[in-house]
Image: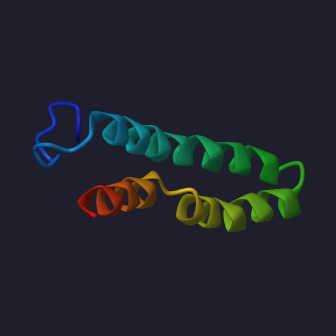
Amino acid sequence: MTGDRGLVVDGMDPDLVRKVQHRIAVGPVIALVAIALAFVSPLASLLIYVALPVLFIVFNPVDTYLERLREAER
């Protein structure tokens, strides 16, 4: 969706757009690993599924970007 930057606001930091693209791409890969792991260790697979949203919330590059913008306005 951001390949031609059609859905990205003009002036958005290209580094932030790249970071978000990578984060979005990593989620399905981790989910596929959890699916494969479910055949070996269902508990480990479940833990990955529980941890995945927490990691996406805690390590959010958008929050850091917005914090930098707020500090720059001061």
Residue drawn at the location 74% of the way across and 58% of the way down = 48
- From the top left corner, tell me how far across and down residue 31 is, in percent: 62, 50
Report the label total: 0
Could you tell whether 6 is left or right of 60 in the image? left
Specify the quadrant of the image occupied by residue 73. bottom left
Specify the quadrant of the image occupied by residue 68. bottom left
- From the top left corner, tell me how far across and down residue 56 is, in percent: 55, 59
Q: Looking at this view, name the residue that lies furthest to the front.
A: 74
Q: Quadrant of the C terminus?
A: bottom left
Q: Nearer the viewer, residue 68 or 50?
A: 68
- From the top left corner, tell me how far across and down residue 61 is, in percent: 46, 52
Q: Nearer the viewer, residue 34 or 6?
A: 6
Q: In this rendering, is residue 54 above or below 69?
A: below
Could you tell whether 62 is left or right of 10 in the image? right
- From the top left corner, tell me how far across and down residue 35 is, in percent: 70, 50
Q: Nearer the viewer, residue 42 or 4?
A: 4
Residue drawn at the location 80% of the way across and 47% of the way down = 37
Residue drawn at the location 74% of the way across and 44% of the way down = 36
Q: Quadrant of the N terminus?
A: top left
